Image: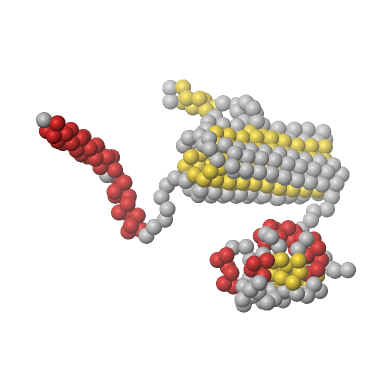
Amino acid sequence: MMTAGVFTLGQLAERLGATVRGSADTLISGLATLQEAGPTQLSFLANPQYRKFLPDCQAGAVLLTAADAQAYTGNVLVVANPYLAYAQLSHLFDRKPQAGAGVHATAQVAADAHVDASASIGAYAVIESGAHVAAGVTVGAHCVVGARSRIGEGGWLAPRVTLYHDVSIGKRVVIQSGAVIGGEGFGFANEKGVWQKIAQIGGVTIGDDVEIGANTTIDRGALSDTLIGNGVKLDNQIMIAHNVQIGDNTAMAGCCGISGSTKIGRNCMIAGGVGMVGHIEVCDNVFVTGMTMVTRSITEPGAYSSGTAMQPAGEWKKSAARIRHLDDMARRLQQLEKQLAAVTQSGNASSDA
């Protein structure tokens, strides 16, 4: 029997369905990078640019593809996808505290709220009227679960998460600190320069196995719900406006801003800092590179970019100066084309004569 968090290489191989090359009895008690791993730690090579660190690696074992394993003399777990294998094993060594079942003495739970006996409600958390907290849910300290909101089985809310009223969360959803789900959408009607607030009477519906990063905000719908599909992964500091729809298994990196009523398809990858205007649609299987501004619908799968890539400041300034003259250059080019066409036509006429 191995103690918690300590495994033999053979045990890890069995869990992964991997092939051991070396000593299956080697003890592994943690994970580390190729540069930092010691004799009781497991490392991995997923990015080719780190292959240079492999010869000097001191790890107890390394997760490698069959091709990379040929050049390494230490213990190896041979796998098809080292990064996926690392992800799967990472949970064995996760030191995140596990909350025990029960309601903390300082928490406030409404009389008509339902909290499963196996759920954990942290210090100073608030569970409002009609809310439903299912089995195995963890609600961290200072969280608020608004009226009639629901959290499905196995959900985990870090401290200081806020769910407004009428928010529906699926099973096994992870929400990090500072996230606000169900805040009022940015809806106003203008009458003679004065903004009149529109009541946001929809809610938010979030599917199963979703992860929502720290300080990310998802606004409630104006009429119908804002919808987040199953398996969606949202990084930190993302803004999802009212009535946005995000399809299953789409992933979005930090600091993206998605305007109201935009529909994003399934299996999309949205890189950091991307902005999308409202009322557009993005089809399935789209990859949008970092800092892109999406100003119209995307109807064909593929990769999309906007803006200019980084370059030395002096070169960028020259390029920016040229960009300012593009309109004038285009007009001059059109004039030259017309002049060339006139000369060519005149020459042809002379030849015919």
Residue 239 vertical position relative to residue 194 in the rendered view, above or below: below
Q: For residue 349, what is the image quadrant?
A: top left
Residue at (65%, 74%) from the top-left corner?
A: 72
Residue 205 vertical position relative to residue 99 in the rendered view, above or below: above
Give coordinates of residue 1: x percent, y percent.
88, 68
Residue 232 vertical position relative to residue 63 in the rendered view, above or below: above
**In front: 326, or 176?**
326
Residue 260 vertical position relative to residue 72 in the rendered view, above or below: above
Kindly give the residue lying farthest to the top in the view shown: 191
User: The C terminus appears in which quarter of the rendering?
Assistant: top left
Q: Is residue 94 left or right of residue 281?
A: right
Does the rendering let one see residue 139? no
Kindly give the residue lying farthest to the right in the view shown: 1
Residue at (62%, 77%) from the top-left corner?
A: 56
Residue at (66%, 50%) from the top-left corner?
A: 177
Give coordinates of residue 306: x percent, y percent.
44, 45
Kindly give the residue lying farthest to the front in the view shown: 352
Q: For residue 74, what is the image quadrant?
A: bottom right
Does the rendering let one see residue 282? yes
Give coordinates of residue 195: x percent, y percent.
49, 27
Residue at (52%, 33%) from the top-left corner?
A: 280
